[in-house]
Amino acid sequence: MRWWKRFTSPVVPVKDFVADYERSFKFKLNKERKINDLTLLVLDTETTGVDIKKDFILSYGSINVQGNSILVGSSKEFYLKSKRLSKETIKVHELVPNQETISREKLIRTFLEDAGNLPIVGHHIGFDLALLEKAGRSFGLRKIKNPVIDTMELGIRLEIGKHADPNRINFSEYSLDSMCIRYGIFPDDRHTAAGDAFLTAQLLIKLLKRARELGILTIGELLDN
């Protein structure tokens, strides 16, 4: 073996659906567009744990929000086959062994086709996106490029302010459960990917209403953290 091969990672061929996704960013998002005119993709993943390096996706749920409406017909939920389902994981996420499962490739293909260059929304969304990037690596996905809105961070910004001191924030008040209760959303169907995506979509609509009241009307203003 030649010495340089020991220190270089093998080049992963880029699948067509990944290339199509990357081409969708040829034109940048117009930050002057009104938030109400955009479609947003809200998503959630349920995973084997919270370690990005060791854990992986068990299920994925998504739904679109447009204006002040949740597009219920756009809802999707997928389960991935896993050999590492613990009793605790099954209990928390209500997964059962005979649920129909799909391949990682189909998950990533569907996710990228749905995401396009739309803004992506989630609660603690950075974790979900990191695991989706990890799942897509073997298909040539290097980075998820979409604009991102974290409903936890947005809630803190709208309630406390953009420059709030993290040391003075009670982050337990900004969990998905706590925020749903505070905004009058009954936290039903928790710890399923589709259920949490739907709850997050409801929370997003409440937060966007508050944003409008504060004069935040364009996607550029919303993304300006």
Image: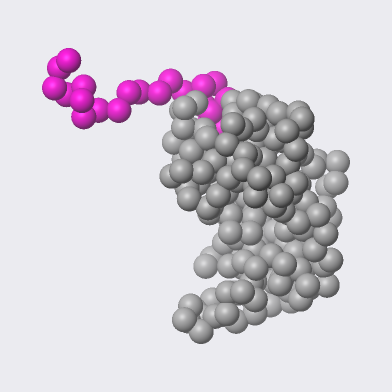
Going by the picture, which residue comes out furthest to the top? 1
User: In which quadrant of the rendered view does residue 156 lie?
Assistant: bottom right
Image location (x, y in percent) of residue 118: 64, 45
State left or right for residue 68 relative to residue 174: right
Position of residue 126 relative to residue 153, above or below, is above
Going by the picture, which residue comes out furthest to the left? 3
| Highlighted magenta segment, given as a residue range | 1-27
Image location (x, y in percent) of residue 78: 72, 35
Query: What residue sits 68% from the left and 27% below the top?
Result: 102
- Residues 186 and 62: in front is 186
Position of residue 145 relative to residue 97, above or below, is below
Query: What residue sits 59% from the left and 31% below the top?
Result: 83
Q: Is residue 52 magenta?
A: no
Image location (x, y in percent) of residue 71: 83, 47
Q: Is residue 27 visible?
A: no
Image location (x, y in percent) of residue 223: 57, 61
Query: What residue sits 65% from the left and 49% below the top?
Result: 88
Position of residue 153 relative to residue 2, above or below, is below
Q: Is residue 20 magenta?
A: yes
